[in-house]
């Protein structure tokens, strides 16, 4: 038998639905006005044996940073370091600036350029490599957007990871 007395029921408080929702560019009717804010959308590839030139040729993209497996290590300023690189690292960078807060169109644009190279990306993982799309916010101010579902599907179909890098202090140009 229940401890509840006749006429008194225990009720859960009504559930409240969240009213927090990300605002996207399509949801606004105002023009973007404000100081320029820079961001990068990058493709980053790490592989144990590929030569950076092979990656550039396969994708038809220029490397903005590359190191080849076995080459002597050095600082970003070119000073020699002890040892050799353990793997190849290759990075292609698209730098953009906006007076608004929106960046997702640039993510979609790079994914569209990468889509014809699906077979290349599929060959990376079985041979010990990996590739990521990186969104890098350079510390110039507020950026916010929603990456469309179709772009996320392309990311998965290409076998790319997603990285996000946020700098608190503004970064100097590369």
Image (cartoon, grey):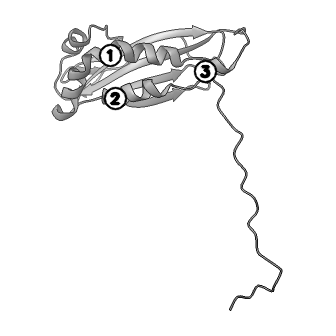
Separation of marks 1 and 2 at Cα, in angstroms: 10 Å
**Depth check, front residue: 128 or 15:** 15
**Depth check, front residue: 160 or 92:** 160
**Residue 10, horizontal then vertical, whole percent:** 76, 74
* N-terminal-most mark, 3 or 2: 3
Separation of marks 3 and 1 at Cα, in angstroms: 27 Å
Residue 20's place in the image compared with 136, above or below, is below
**Residue 152, horizontal then vertical, whole percent:** 43, 28
* N-terminal-most mark, 3 or 1: 1
**Residue 164, horizontal then vertical, whole percent:** 49, 29
Residue at the spot 50% in from the left edge and 28% down from the top edge: 165
Task: Look at the numbered disc 3 and give the secondary structure of its residue.
Answer: loop
- Residue at the far bottom in the pictured view: 1
10 Å neighbourhood of mark 2: few (<14), some, or many (≥20)? many
Q: Which residue is mark 2?
A: 160
Determine whether label 3 and label 1 are within 8 Å by CB.
Answer: no
Q: Which residue is mark 1?
A: 114
Determine whether label 3 and label 2 are within 8 Å by CB.
Answer: no
Q: Using the rendered image of the protein, determine whether residue 78 is visible from the camera's viewpoint.
A: no
**Residue 13, horizontal then vertical, whole percent:** 76, 62
Task: Look at the numbered disc 2 and give the secondary structure of its residue.
Answer: loop
Residue 54's place in the image compared with 69, above or below, is above
Determine whether label 1 and label 2 are within 8 Å by CB.
Answer: yes
The answer to whether residue 105 is left or right of residue 22 is left
* N-terminal-most mark, 1 or 2: 1
The answer to whether residue 100 is left or right of residue 149 is right
Could you tell me which quadrant the N terminus lies in? bottom right
Q: Which residue is mark 3?
A: 139
Image quadrant where residue 55 sits: top left
Residue 92's place in the image compared with 11, above or below, is above
């Amino acid at each position: 038998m229940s401890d509840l007395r006749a006429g008194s029921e225990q009720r859960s408080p009504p559930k409240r639905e969240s009213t927090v929702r990300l605002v996207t560019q399509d949801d606004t009717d105002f023009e973007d006005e404000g100081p320029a804010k820079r961001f990068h959308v990058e493709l980053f590839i790490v592989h144990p044996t590929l030569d950076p030139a092979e990656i550039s040729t396969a994708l038809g993209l220029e490397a903005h940073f590359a190191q080849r497996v076995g080459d002597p290590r050095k600082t970003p300023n070119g000073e020699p370091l002890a040892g050799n690189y353990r793997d190849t690292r290759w990075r292609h960078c698209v730098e953009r600036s906006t007076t608004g807060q929106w960046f997702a169109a640039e993510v979609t644009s790079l994914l569209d350029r990468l889509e014809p190279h699906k077979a290349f990306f599929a060959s990376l993982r079985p041979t010990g490599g990996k590739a990521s799309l990186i969104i890098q916010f350079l510390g110039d101010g507020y950026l916010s957007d929603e990456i469309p579902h179709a772009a996320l599907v392309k990311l998965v179909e290409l076998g790319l990871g997603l990285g996000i890098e946020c700098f608190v202090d503004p970064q100097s140009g590369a």
